[in-house]
Image (spheres, rainbow, N blue to C red):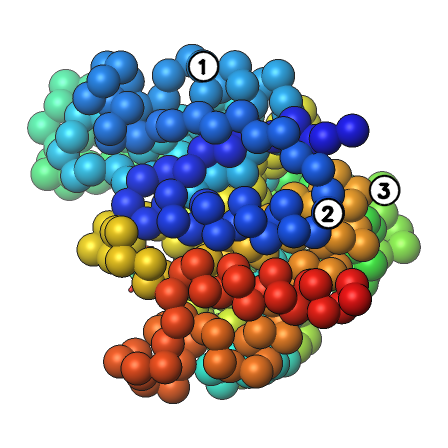
Amino acid sequence: MAYRVTFIPGDGTGPEISEAVRRVLEATGVEFEWDWQDAGADVYESEGTPLPDRVIDSIKERGLAIKGPITTPVGSGFRSVNVALRKELDLFACLRPCKAYEGVRTRFPDTDIVVVRENHEDLYAGVEYEIGDDDTERLREFIKETTGTELREDVGISIKPISVTGTKRIVRQAFEYAKAYGRSKVTAVHKANIMKFTDGLFLKTAKEVAEDEYPDIEFEDRIVDNLCNQLVSRPEEYDVLVLPNLYGDIVSDLGAGLIGGLGMAPGANVGDDYAVFEAVHGSAPKYKGQNKVNPMALMLSGVMLLRHIEEREAGDRLEEAIAEVIREGDSVTYDMKPSRDDPSAVGTSDVADAVIAKMERVAA
Ligand code: NAD
């Protein structure tokens, strides 16, 4: 029976990448019934919203989606479709595997970590007070009254909420990932030495979940600045990392840098009921329609999708085919060549051809 999956092609370079990914996923032999759903700036023009209900309904019905990147126009008045999707579907966890494949240009060939980032809380919760607002003034007074701290008059304030509930579920997600994929260690990342009531709570809760529920998997913690230092000196010592929203955002881009750049960094946003697979990178609009950008990040997100639906053998086969194309270094896009203007770089669709040819050779 075919898997019913929502496919959001995205905009900018999204549609060309999505087409390449559709082809390689179908070439695995796993059957899919795609429900194509547009979202983003063009949809905003025609339907008055960049994320119509039909997109959300489609994902709710199927439980699964794969998604190309979507542009968030600066100053357009609409919020990021990507953020809205995470909220609407309660996709509280962002999973970002960062693995350096042989043949990728990187100084850190031994990197194989998974960043598990909390998606809803922390400084990204959207609770903010603008400079000069009456509410900001009231908050300033409240803070002075309750803590004795006098904030400057010309201050803007962002609130950092971190809850036990939010932390428990993200930490469980990290351990469940470790269990499902044979990972041996989870590291909780924080700044608990400075922010005791938020990061301190995150660390305490993470320790409790580790001890009470996952005694068989190694657990440790690191202060975020120390972790960054260690990731760029000995990344091989890390396995699964679990982080609050802001550190997770920064460390996952650091992770993408460790493994050869954005063109190689896959991801998934998951919750209890739904999962949306998407690359870390954006829509790279300046390359739109040029058949130029690297589809491997979304292909590797497709590998994650296959494993998520328990089509592990197909996932392994697709990953191995991608790895072999990278190892050979011929049929790769400009960003994976020694110099960015290398004339031997191939296009987005050629990478799909090469990956499919590799899978066919293995099958023959
Ligand atoms: P971007 O990731 O689109 O591109 C930055 C640069 O990274 C590109 O110019 C290119 O040099 C390189 N790059 C990105 N993807 C690549 C690929 N697949 N292959 C080769 N090189 C690649 O980031 P940006 O320019 O900051 O964002 C463009 C738009 O995308 C913005 O509107 C942003 O809001 C949006 N965005 C969307 C998502 C998403 O849909 N999940 C994520 C990030 C950004």
Q: Earlier in the sequence, mark 3 or mark 2?
A: 2
Most extreme residue toward the front is 364
Rendering coords of residue 88 (x, y %): 48, 21
The residue lying at 28 percent from left, 24 percent from top is: 43
Residue 217 seen by the camera: yes
- Marks 1/2: CA–CA distance: 29 Å
- Give me the disc on residue 9: none
User: Label 2 sits on what residue type?
Assistant: Gly
* Mark 2 residue crowding within 10 angstroms, few (<14) / some (14–19) / many (20+): few
In screen coordinates, is 199 left or right of 364?
left
Q: Nearer the viewer, mark 3 or mark 2?
A: 2
Rendering coords of residue 7 (x, y %): 51, 33
| Element on which disc 3 rests | helix
Q: Earlier in the sequence, mark 3 or mark 1?
A: 1
- Give me the disc on residue 29: 2
The residue lying at 88 percent from left, 51 percent from top is: 215
Q: Earlier in the sequence, mark 1 or mark 2?
A: 2
In screen coordinates, is 363 left or right of 4?
right
